[in-house]
Amino acid sequence: MDFFNDNIVEYGGVRIYRLILPAIKLSLSELYPLSLNPTAFPDKTIELPVNAWLVEYGDKRVLIDTGINNVGEDKLPVTGHPGDSFIEQLALYGIKPEAITHVIHTHLHLDHVGWSTLFNNGSWVPTFINASYFASKLEVAYQLSEKGMAEGGGAIFRDSVLPLILTNQLKVLVDEQGEISTGISYQLFPGHSPGHMVIWLETSNAVLCFCGDIFHTIRQIENPQLASSFCRNTQQALSSRKTFLKRAAHRGAIVFSAHLDLPSVGTLHATDTGYKWLPYAPSSRFGK
């Protein structure tokens, strides 16, 4: 039987767990500044959820992003910790770190790579010792560029990427799209960051996708023109968002979001002015 609740989806032999990280606290005017948009937003403070996802199918246990760790919490204005840590949440689902087979980074920002490594005995080491990690070549290169370093990419590279290189666990993706494992593929949608990726998972009767930071709130679904202050290339991000929304809606994809609130999962449907987000409720069932 297919099952869905706020944090667990089971469908067609695939089980997906939502991992909850501290939310980022900021105002709407900071997220969608007037300098990038034709109208001003109020200074109303919102909490931007941070979600990571664990996909379990066959003999594979795949993490899509790893959220924000304690160091990141010190650098970003976050809410209080949701309770159990990332590793403790995995344990609640009966998953040990050594059981993870793949870690796929949609991009390498602070709130998406936090638990990929752990600080142990004075150095950063991979958290998931048996996993292959994946990230776009463009993403790694940008972190090491002068502009990327100025934006904090150097520290992220040192703490969250270099340890994976030193243990030969990082697989750098050089193509615009391709297959990572049977049924799981990636596709570049740059703009939020140079190597930002969407991850697609195809089952026998459904298309699921993990969209990273294509959008940050439902506002950018309803109005794809809305520009976020977090995006490195505003026009490129806009183009990627429009392309993704159209493609996901056309394919009827079940979308797992990085920053939408509960249930964080839904489908996209075209409207006259943009798209409509239809979230799944705990009583919903896939495959209708």
Image: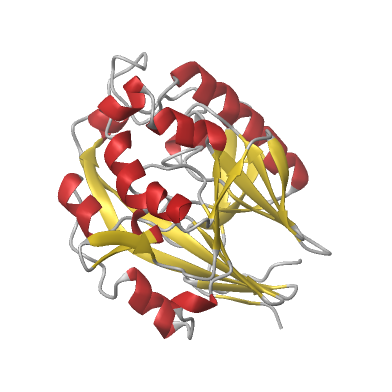
Relative to the observer, which residue lies in front, 217 or 276? 217
| The quarter of the displayed image where residue 50 is located | bottom left
Q: Where is residue 79 in the image (x, y as percent from the top left)?
A: 19, 56
Residue sitting at x 72%, y 76%: 58
| The quarter of the displayed image where residue 182 is located | bottom right
Q: In which quarter of the image is the C terminus?
A: bottom right
Horizontal side, residue 259 vs residue 76: left or right: right
Q: Which residue lies furthest to the right in this view?
A: 204
**In this picture, is 52 found above or below 27?**
below
Residue sitting at x 32%, y 35%: 153
Residue sitting at x 45%, y 75%: 97
**In this picture, is 286 found above or below 108?**
below
Horizontal side, residue 78 vs residue 8: left or right: left
Q: Quadrant of the N terminus?
A: bottom right
Residue sitting at x 68%, y 33%: 176
Relative to the observer, which residue lies in front, 160 or 215? 160
Q: Position of residue 121 (x, y in %)?
A: 22, 68
Relative to the observer, which residue lies in front, 171 or 280? 171
**In this picture, is 234 found above or below 144?**
above
Q: Which colour scheme is used?
A: secondary structure
Horizontal side, residue 225 vs residue 172: left or right: left
Q: How many labels does the image show?
A: 0
Q: Position of residue 229 (x, y in %)?
A: 33, 27
Q: Position of residue 209 (x, y in %)?
A: 64, 52
